[in-house]
Amino acid sequence: MRLLLDTHVAIWWLSGDGRLSAATRKAIEDAPNAFVSAVSLWEILIKQDTGRLDLPTGFADALRVDFIELPLTFDHALAGRALPLVHRDPFDRMLVAQAKVEALTIVTADRMLAEYGVPVLSA
């Protein structure tokens, strides 16, 4: 299974947060391909800059060690534009678009993302 981590899942992974279930952590560890989107890094940086999130220095490098970077492409942007407004968060909508274009399963605790018809692995 090829996985795309939602932003909160990437944060939980880095911090060892207990909200990430043991079964899901194992699925991520065992996945042949586990991706983190550049969109998630952008969201994390915005939250840090606004004081809503505090992660240690080097967290981006830690993501690169554990996961494959998924860049944002024109095809992703076009797919995002075509999505219905089920979810208003532009970061989540872009992750859905990337999952659709790249045939990825999203690892998330956000149940609304499944309404887009993408495969979801519950965090």
Image (cartoon, rainbow, N blue to C red):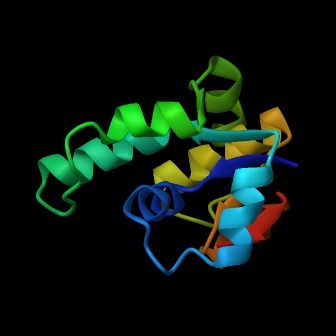
Q: Residue 90 in the image: state x and y as whole percent.
A: 48, 51
Q: Nearer the viewer, residue 94 or 34?
A: 34
* Residue 27, image quadrant: bottom right
Q: Nearer the viewer, residue 107 or 89?
A: 107
Q: Residue sitting at 24 percent across and 46 percent down?
A: 46
In the picture provided, is 77 more to the left or to the right than 34?
Answer: left
Q: Residue 39 in the image: state x and y as whole percent.
A: 47, 38
Instruction: Look at the image and tell me whether residue 82 can be seen.
Output: no
Q: Nearer the viewer, residue 89 or 54?
A: 54
Q: Residue 66 in the image: state x and y as whole percent.
A: 56, 39
Q: State whether residue 49 is above or below residue 54.
A: above
Quarter in which the C terminus is drawn:
bottom right
Q: Residue sitting at 32 percent across and 42 percent down?
A: 59
In the picture provided, is 63 more to the left or to the right than 115?
Answer: left
Instruction: Look at the image and tell me whether residue 79 can be seen.
Output: yes
In the picture provided, is 115 more to the left or to the right than 111?
Answer: right
Q: Residue sitting at 62 percent across and 61 percent down?
A: 85
In the picture provided, is 120 more to the left or to the right than 48?
Answer: right
Q: Nearer the viewer, residue 19 or 108?
A: 19
Task: Report the number of numbered marks.
Answer: 0
Q: Residue 105 in the image: state x and y as whole percent.
A: 79, 53
* Residue 25, image quadrant: bottom right
Q: Residue sitting at 88 percent across and 49 percent down?
A: 1
